[in-house]
Image: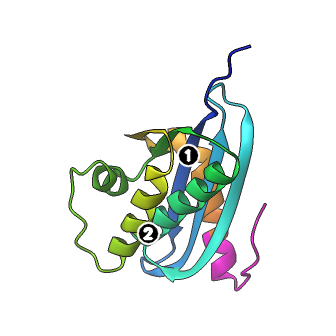
């Protein structure tokens, strides 16, 4: 029997209530056929929306790596994040640069990665998780959501 690389689709998002304000990140990891692998909602404290977007991506990349994924498709509704990762936009922000570098290092650990921008409605699950994490942060709850 021939074995194929472990493939997955990573949907990631971030939210900030105030920008900067109480923030959260979320990701959903699915098989290419849509089967659930993992998800998380991560309260971040006070952060900007763009920082939260990167945190969602980074958390999802860590999970994909832990799951043994080698072929990853990343989907985000953040045009800035996608264009920075594709090299179409430069990273000027001092806050984003270390997150960008961390994401690039993690991405390089996979055999194959495809990054694409999607419409917000196609990212509803990750959006909901990020929003929930930001709301919990706003209410003062810093526990992780699973």
Residue drawn at point x = 42 percent, y = 70 percent: 99
| Direction from residue 100 to residue 3 in the image, left or right | right
Which numbered disc covers residue 49?
Answer: 2
Q: Indicate the position of residue 40 as horizontal and vertical percent values.
A: 69, 59
Nearest-to-viewer mark from 2 and 1: 1
Q: Quadrant of the C terminus?
A: bottom right
Residue drawn at point x = 43 percent, y = 69 percent: 49
Q: Nearer the viewer, residue 132 or 30?
A: 30
Residue 13 in sight = yes
Question: For numbered disc 2, what is the local secondary structure?
Answer: helix
Question: For numbered disc 1, what is the local secondary structure?
Answer: strand
Q: Indicate the position of residue 17 as horizontal and vertical percent values.
A: 51, 74
| Direction from residue 96 to residue 38 in the image, left or right | right
Q: Earlier in the sequence, mark 2 or mark 1?
A: 1
Q: Nearer the viewer, residue 53 or 6?
A: 6
| Up/down of 146 relative to 21, above or below | above
């Amino acid at each position: 029997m021939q074995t194929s690389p472990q493939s997955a689709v990573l949907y990631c998002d971030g939210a900030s209530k105030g920008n900067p304000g109480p923030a959260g990140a979320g990701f959903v990891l699915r098989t290419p056929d849509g089967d659930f692998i993992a998800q998380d909602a991560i309260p971040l404290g006070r952060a900007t929306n763009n920082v939260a977007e990167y945190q969602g991506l980074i958390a999802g990349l860590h999970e994909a790596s832990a799951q043994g994924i080698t072929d990853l498709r990343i989907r985000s509704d953040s045009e800035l994040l996608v264009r920075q990762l594709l090299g179409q936009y430069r990273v000027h922000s001092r806050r984003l640069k270390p997150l960008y570098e961390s994401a690039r290092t993690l991405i390089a650990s996979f055999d194959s990665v495809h990054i694409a921008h999607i419409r917000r409605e196609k990212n509803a699950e990750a959006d909901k998780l990020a929003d929930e994490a930001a709301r919990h942060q706003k209410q003062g709850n810093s526990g992780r959501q699973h």
